[in-house]
Amino acid sequence: MSNLTRIKSAEKYETPIMSMDEFKIGLLEKDRIPGLLLRSDENGYYVIGIQINDNEVVKVESALEDDAMRKIMYWSDRVEQIRDLYNNGAPGL
C-alpha cells in the first residue's frame, strides 16, 4: 500500500513530487484516464502517478504486473481529489 496520512478528510501522499521528465523515464502511458500516468519497465514493474500540473507528477503507487490493474482502478477514481489536494496548498506540502 501507499504511505498515506489523513488531513481533514483528504489524503496526503508522502511520496515526492517529480518533474514530468523524471517520471517519463521508462515506457509511459497517459491519456487513457486523464491525469493518471503509468510508467512501466521491461520487468513488469509499474509506477502510477497523478499529473498535478503541466510540469509535475505525484507518484502515488508502485505495483507488479499482476496487481497493477487493481491499483490503476483505485487511483483512477481519485485523480481529481489528488489534484485538488496539491493545487489548493494543503498544509505540510
Image (tube, helix red, strand yellow):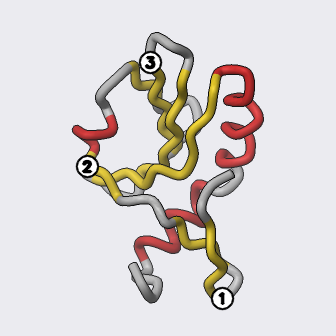
Tell me whether the residue at label 2 lies in contact with that at label 3, contact meaning CB atoms closer than 8 angstroms: no
For disc 1, the neighbor class at 10 Å (few under 14, some 14 to 19, many from 20) is few
Q: The disc labelled 2 sits on which kind of residue? A: Ser
Q: Which mark is residue 19?
A: 2
Q: How many marks?
A: 3
* 75 in relation to 3, above or below: above
Q: Position of residue 66 (x, y in %)?
A: 73, 21
Q: Position of residue 43 (x, y in %)?
A: 51, 13
Residue that label 1 marks: 8
Whether residue 39 is visible, yes or no, is yes
Q: The disc labelled 3 sits on which kind of residue? A: Asp
- What element does badge 3 sit on? loop
Q: Position of residue 69 (x, y in %)?
A: 72, 29
Q: Nearer the viewer, mark 2 or mark 3?
A: 3
Q: Residue at x 57, y 46 (%)?
A: 61
Q: The disc labelled 1 sits on which kind of residue? A: Lys
Q: Residue at x 33, y 38 (%)?
A: 23
Residue that label 3 marks: 41
Cα–Cα gap, marks 2 and 3: 18 Å
Q: Residue at x 62, y 84 (%)?
A: 7
For disc 3, the neighbor class at 10 Å (few under 14, some 14 to 19, many from 20) is few
With 78 as the anchor, is 55 left or right in this view?
A: left
> In the image as oriented, which residue stretches furthest toward the right?
70
